[in-house]
Image: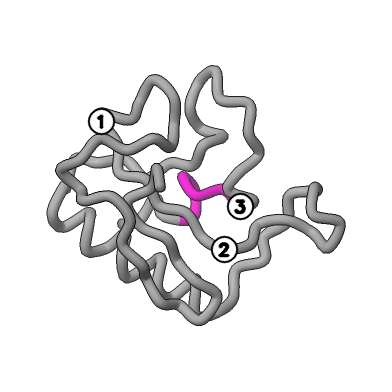
């Protein structure tokens, strides 16, 4: 798995790669980022981006990101779509804006 964390539908946070291990989640930025993904993010057609986060996922993401920000206070929270040259619509919500207050 290329991510460091995966947030399941019930809010369970599964660990992927150890944080000290370079991920494989955003080309050109893997060595300076921590990769987090969540289950979902697409409409019923399996293609169109859609914010499908459950309340449990939203709470778990907020908790995880808060913990990581305390550990790495200078870190920015961004989604794939916020990185140059990454042609992805994910996450299916504006992570940079949603978590700007962390």
Q: Residues within 10 Å of mark 2 (few under 14, many from 20)?
A: some
Say whether disc 2 or disc 3 marks the residue closer to the N-terminus: 2
Q: Is residue 95 magenta?
A: yes
Q: Residue at x 83, y 63 (%)?
A: 44
Q: Quadrant of residue 99?
A: bottom left
The residue that disc 3 covers is 93
Say whether disc 2 or disc 1 marks the residue closer to the N-terminus: 1
Q: Residue at x 35, y 57 (%)?
A: 5
Q: Is residue 78 magenta?
A: no
- Report, in whole angstroms, how far the alpha carbon at label 2 lies from the one at label 1: 23 Å
Name the foreground residue: 16 vs 39: 16
The residue that disc 1 covers is 32
- Identify the element where label 1 is drawn: helix
Quick check: 62 above or below 35?
below
Q: Which residues are magenta?
A: 93-98
Q: Quadrant of residue 41?
A: bottom right
Asked if the residue under mark 3 is in contact with the one under mark 1, i.e. CB atoms within 8 Å, the reply is no
Q: Nearer the viewer, mark 2 or mark 3?
A: 2
Q: Nearer the viewer, mark 2 or mark 1?
A: 2
Say whether disc 1 or disc 3 marks the residue closer to the N-terminus: 1
The quadrant of the rendering that contains the C terminus is: bottom left
Residue 92 drawn at (x, y percent) = 64, 51
Q: Nearer the viewer, mark 1 or mark 3?
A: 1
> In the rendered view, does 79 fall on the left or right side of 35?
right
**Which residue, as the protein is rendered here, is positioned at the far right?**
45
Q: Residues within 10 Å of mark 1 (few under 14, many from 20)?
A: few
Q: Which mark is residue 39?
A: 2
Residue 98 drawn at (x, y percent) = 49, 55
Name the foreground residue: 92 vs 11: 11
> In the rendered view, does 83 fall on the left or right side of 54?
left
């Amino acid at each position: 798995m290329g991510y460091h964390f995966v947030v399941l539908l019930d809010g369970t946070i599964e660990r992927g790669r150890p944080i000290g291990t370079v991920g494989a989640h955003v080309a050109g930025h893997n060595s300076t980022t921590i990769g987090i993904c969540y289950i979902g993010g697409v409409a019923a057609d399996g293609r169109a981006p859609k914010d499908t986060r459950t309340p449990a996922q939203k709470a778990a993401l907020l908790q995880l990101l808060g913990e990581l920000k305390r550990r790495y206070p200078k870190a920015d929270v961004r989604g794939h779509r916020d990185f140059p040259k990454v042609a992805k619509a994910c996450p299916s919500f504006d992570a940079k804006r949603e978590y700007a207050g962390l």
